[in-house]
Image (cartoon, helix red, strand yellow):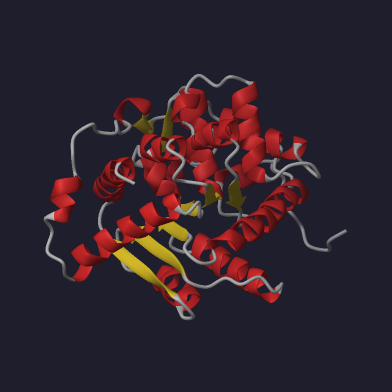
Amino acid sequence: MSKFIEIDLSNLNKTSIKSRSSLVKKDIFSKPSLNSFKEFTESLPDILKAKDFNELLDKCVQAYKNDKPVIVALGGHVIKCGLAPNFIEMMELGLITGLASNGSVVIHDYEIAKFGETSENVATALETGEFGMAKETCDGINKIISSAYNKLGYGEAIGKNLIETKAENNHLSLFANAYKMGIPFTVHVALGTDIVHQHETADGAAIGDCSMRDFRILCNNLIELNDGGVFLNFGSAVIMPEVFLKAVTVVRNLGYPLNNFYTAVFDMNMHYRPRANIVHRPTLSGGKGYYFIGHHEIMIPLFFQTLKERLKDA
């Protein structure tokens, strides 16, 4: 028993997501294009970031042809930008072989799957103490994870539940589609960073157990990156770069070769951790890292649409 006093969460005044103002609704989600980007990207000057962009596209195609993994890491903003359909399409094509994310991705994906909307107005809700108090979201996710204690990984538990409960918008859910396709989707939680942790239904032991299991699953998935695999990080500036670095060293410490693979970061700003922990340090002994700066809602559809066309020629 701790000698320090904990705040009592049992009397929280919860709200309903149905009455909450959400900034993102399913109607704004992207619709992968049928038009050609191949000629456009091939016409770019063969220099600096344009050269890097085409190189990375080629590395992804080579990984696909050689049956090497392409593992994608995500931050929550990617889901809030309505880009799940682009990732789902790449999963269906067999390009994306694994996913990993922080806890915020679960929240936004779950809300879209269940309710067709997500992303509350934090500034307004924070003033009234209503930020993160959506009962359906937080109690729903916490119940799933408590039930998965000592059984499943965090991401697997979420995907399994969305499929079994036949969530209305599962076609837009990364977790539901990953589970349906048998693609591992690991979740790496930092306790206290997600709105689900504000609620009395949050079970720290269950969260830690499921997320720890996912870390070990991710480590196992990284083994196959050796000699030609690709690791892409879209929009996680802190959690996933730190997790990736630790997972890489676990794999190498256990005696598995992990060299000559390719990494890339897509984000709206240049950040230290993604640059050091994903682009630079892991590829020092072979391979190459890339960093692209731009808005997700432009860069990700551009990258995946071009990649889709190149895969057709592979």
Instruction: Pick whichever, 25 or 250, lies toward us.
Output: 250
Residue 311, quarter of picture: top left
Instruction: Pick whichever, 91 or 277, lies toward us.
Output: 91
Picture layout, residue 91 above or below residue 16: below
Q: Quadrant of the N terminus?
A: bottom right
In the orientation shown, which residue stands out farthest toward the right?
Answer: 1
Instruction: Please report the residue visible at 61 percent of the width from the left and 53 percent of the height from the top.
Output: 189
In the rendered image, residue 201, in percent from the top left (x then y), is placed at 71, 38
Instruction: Pick whichever, 51 or 153, lies toward us.
Output: 51
Q: Is residue 171 visible?
A: yes
In the rendered image, residue 102, in percent from the top left (x then y), is placed at 54, 52
In the rendered image, residue 114, in percent from the top left (x then y), is placed at 52, 25
Instruction: Please report the residue visible at 50 percent of the width from the left and 25 percent of the height from the top.
Output: 170
Q: Across the whole image, how many numbered discs are drawn on residues?
A: 0
Picture layout, residue 52 above or below residue 81: below
In the rendered image, residue 179, in percent from the top left (x then y), is placed at 59, 34
Q: Is residue 267 visible?
A: no
Instruction: Please report the residue visible at 16 percent of the width from the left and 54 percent of the height from the top.
Output: 42
Decide if residue 9 is on the left or right side of residue 47.
right
Decide if residue 72 is on the left or right side of residue 246.
left
Instruction: Please report the residue visible at 42 percent of the width from the left and 65 percent of the height from the top.
Output: 263
Residue 57, quarter of picture: bottom left
In the orientation shown, which residue stands out farthest toward the bottom?
Answer: 285
Picture layout, residue 26 above or below residue 48: above
